[in-house]
Image (cartoon, helix red, strand yellow):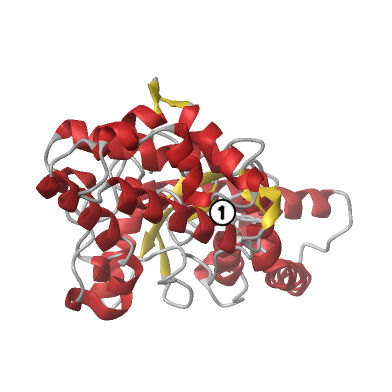
Amino acid sequence: MLYPINPPSCSPALDWAVQLQRDLITKLCDPNTTRAMVTPQWVRALRANPQEIADWLEGFAGRKFEGVQVIDAMEYIANLNTDEKMAALNYFSNNHRFTDEFVLGSTVSPTVDVSIVGNPQIQSALKTILNAFYKNGLLYLDGFPIDGNGNPGQCTNRNVFVDAFKKDNNINVCPLCDGDLNGPEVDHWLPESKYPALSCHPKNLVPICHDCNSPANKHYKVPLTAGHAQPFEEWFHPYERTANGQMNLEVRDGRNVYFASDDPLIQKRFENLDWLINLAKRWSNIYQREKGLYIKTLRGQIARGKLRPEPDAVLEKIQEWKEGVEDRGIEDSYSIIKSKILEMISNPESADFKALLQEITNGNS
């Protein structure tokens, strides 16, 4: 998103889950599959070997998801008529091309939410089955019964996913807002409530900070238009379309951060991102806080005799901070805002620097 990132190296485990979802939905939507056939033994047969995978799958089917036993939802899908089964299967299969739209645009079928299948009961059954893979699988401590390479063995769970993401991308900041990524939440870019077919898709899952995923920001909001996930060209994407190198920040009234671009499409993408997580307002608050900390630090060093209250000495300290922010990069939260502040006050001829110098030397807060 704000930086170029990739899905974590344990993504083969998610690919395994997606393939299992596909095989399960395909079997359930087979016209020859009846409700009576869907038993624990039938579920086990989807992955009969090795035994630990079959055991996991049987246990998965026996668990409840939001009060509904997963195998009951499977039976419901198996009992649909042929047309209803085809609608459910087509919904699942079509949505797994959603990342193609970033490359191929309108030449592929649009990604759509689960309402496309019509019957609310069918929607509910699909959500139960597909979202259970995420909440009863990846989020469980025992996770999926395979390692990060997609082979039977050690489990892959939420913690494995997050750790691999941070290590592989050498990142410790939220990819959406540049804030701290301690205690991240694994977010669905397109929410599983409307896009259950993408509940385990490795390019629809990204660790983000609690603030970005809070009800006040992304949480219940749906990127892209409701119903049909179009137009993709007007959105950034965590993995498929980065904002890196396209961000031009402006600070107005000495306190408010705005996104500015001469390219209408880039500007629209930033406007959409801002709508999604209230980024401009949050960054404006961070700008004021961080600038205040820089001023407080400079004033304190001058008061303690550790910094001469002269332009060249102050500029040298600012340059030292700039280099530190650049060196730490995506290991340091809000480096984008910090860089903007230091850029604005590092020009000795600028009004920003002159105002800063006056503020830190007049002894007033």
Q: Could one spot residue 360 in this view of the protein?
A: yes
* Residue at 67 percent of width and 55 percent of height: 152
Q: In the rendering, at what x and y percent does residue 220 appear?
A: 33, 38
What is the count of numbered marks?
A: 1
Label 1 crowd (10 A; few <14 / some 14-19 / many >=20)? many
* Residue at 53 percent of width and 46 percent of height: 186
Task: Provide the residue designation for mark 1.
Answer: 174
Kind of element beneath mark 1: loop
Q: In the rendering, at what x and y percent does residue 94 appear?
A: 25, 62
Q: In the rendering, at what x and y percent does residue 70 appear?
A: 40, 31
In the image: residue 303, left or right of residue 213: right
* Residue at 30 percent of width and 31 percent of height: 36
As rendered, which of 126 and 232 lies closer to the eye?
Answer: 126
Amino acid at circle 1? Cys
Image vertical order of residue 355 relative to residue 124, above or below: below
Image vertical order of residue 356 relative to residue 196, above or below: below
As rendered, which of 83 and 238 lies closer to the eye?
Answer: 83
* Residue at 67 percent of width and 66 percent of height: 168
Q: Residue furthest right?
A: 305
In the image: residue 126, left or right of residue 161: left
Q: Residue furthest top?
A: 67
Q: In the rendering, at what x and y percent does residue 102 appear?
A: 31, 73
Image quarter (top left, top right, bottom left or bottom right) of the C terminus: top right
As rendered, which of 214 and 22 lies closer to the eye?
Answer: 22
As rendered, which of 230 and 125 lies closer to the eye?
Answer: 125
Q: Could one spot residue 189 in this view of the protein?
A: no
In the image: residue 281, left or right of residue 307: left
